[in-house]
């Protein structure tokens, strides 16, 4: 366990530099009785904070925020903040304006550094009212706001401009739709009108699309690979942010693509394969909650072989390195 200093007082301007990097999307571990394992949350946040990751998002989509109660989500935020110390924690909030506002308020009081607002639940938003949704949640906190564009949250370039004008503490835009052309159009439109430094542009569809998004102007990305191998996510960012696309292509083929081939095998595997990898490596994870599918024996065996082939550090290897005062692990 690492002893950490007091938490930074986070402002929208203070969080901006930390968004230009690899942002971890950790899993939410469950105990045998199905409850959230807060001790495992702490352990995961502790090792992520020493890995070179720029920030930790909790609870994220990979962290099954959609399957948690509000109280569980709040507990995940608070415990992650305790573990992360100086590494900023970005808390997810949303679903509805009142619930989102309550979650954002709790997160700020718990020491979170920013709020990532997930799309509204169920109803199909009117474009103007969608902006009101983000404004309602943002008004409950002084922290920086990151809208997460996916599912019901479909933005046009003009809508993002209007959102930023209506909500001054919006500091970044995260695209989770996988439409790189639209992402590029939004970034160009907003940057030309409001300035290139107004927002940090985040890729949010997965480690496998880092290359296309960075070529289109992304400056950071959210990573589920970071659950069990954050150093690999940091290496992806290094290659992409320095424009080493040849190296990025090789790294993608060797490291990222095999995991994503497994993740795409069945609905829900984008979460449960990450959890299974954690368990194979000796971390606590538990199964994904319904309605997500969990890997069977053959898929777990294939995953275990891949982890061994790539020499991904186990929990015991990480612990031994830390005990020896050496936290660096291979990427």
Image: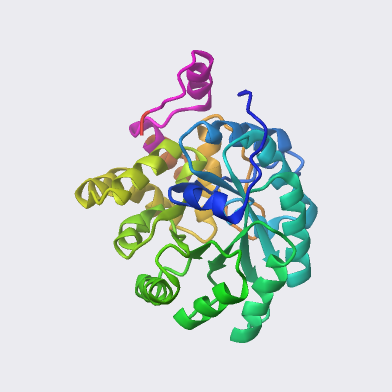
Compared to residue 315, the image places residue 222 above or below, namely below
Task: Report the magenta residues as a range.
Answer: 306-329
- Residue 97 % position (x, y): 74, 71
- Residue 317 % position (x, y): 48, 21
- The answer to which quarter of the image holds residue 216 is bottom left
Which quadrant is the N terminus positioned in? top right
Who's the residue at 44% across and 51% down the image? Answer: 20
- Out of 27 and 133, give the one closest to the viewer: 133
Is-magenta flag for residue 311? yes
- Out of 210 and 293, give the one closest to the viewer: 210
Who's the residue at 61% across and 64% down the image? Answer: 169
Who's the residue at 68% across and 75% down the image? Answer: 133
Residue 191 appearing in the image: yes
- Residue 27 % position (x, y): 59, 46
- Out of 287 and 76, give the one closest to the viewer: 76
Compared to residue 26, the image places residue 84 above or below, namely above
Residue farthest along the top direction in this orientation: 324
- Residue 45 % position (x, y): 60, 36
Who's the residue at 36% across and 34% down the image? Answer: 331
């Amino acid at each position: 366990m690492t002893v950490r200093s007091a938490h930074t007082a986070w402002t929208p301007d203070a969080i901006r530099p930390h968004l230009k990097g690899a942002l971890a999307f950790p899993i939410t571990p469950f105990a045998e009785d199905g409850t959230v394992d807060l001790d495992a949350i702490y352990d995961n946040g502790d090792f992520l904070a020493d890995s070179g990751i720029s920030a930790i998002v909790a609870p994220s989509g990979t962290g099954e925020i959609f399957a948690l109660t509000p109280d569980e989500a709040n507990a995940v935020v608070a415990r992650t903040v305790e573990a992360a110390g100086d590494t900023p924690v970005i808390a997810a909030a949303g679903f509805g304006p009142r619930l989102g506002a309550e979650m954002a308020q709790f997160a700020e009081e718990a020491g979170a550094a920013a709020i990532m607002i997930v799309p509204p639940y169920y109803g199909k938003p009117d474009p103007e009212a969608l902006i009101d949704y983000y404004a309602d949640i943002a008004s409950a906190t002084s922290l920086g706001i990151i809208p997460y564009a996916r599912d019901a949250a479909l933005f046009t370039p003009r809508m993002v401009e209007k959102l930023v004008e209506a909500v001054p503490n919006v500091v970044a835009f995260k695209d989770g739709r996988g439409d790189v052309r639209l992402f590029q159009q939004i970034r160009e439109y907003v940057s030309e009108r409001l300035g290139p430094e107004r927002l940090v542009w985040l890729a949010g569809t997965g480690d496998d699309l880092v290359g296309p998004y960075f070529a289109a102007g992304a400056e950071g990305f959210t990573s589920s690979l970071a659950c069990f191998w954050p150093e690999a996510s940091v290496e992806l960012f290094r290659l992409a942010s320095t424009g080493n696309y040849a190296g990025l292509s090789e790294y993608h083929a060797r490291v990222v693509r095999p995991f994503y081939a497994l993740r795409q095998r069945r609905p829900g595997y984008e979460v449960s394969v990450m959890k299974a990898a954690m368990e194979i490596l000796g971390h606590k994870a538990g199964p994904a909650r319904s309605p997500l599918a969990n890997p069977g024996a053959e898929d777990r065996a294939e995953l275990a072989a891949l982890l061994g082939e790539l020499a991904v550090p186990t929990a015991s290897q990480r612990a031994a390195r830390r005990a020896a005062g050496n936290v660096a692990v291979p990427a």
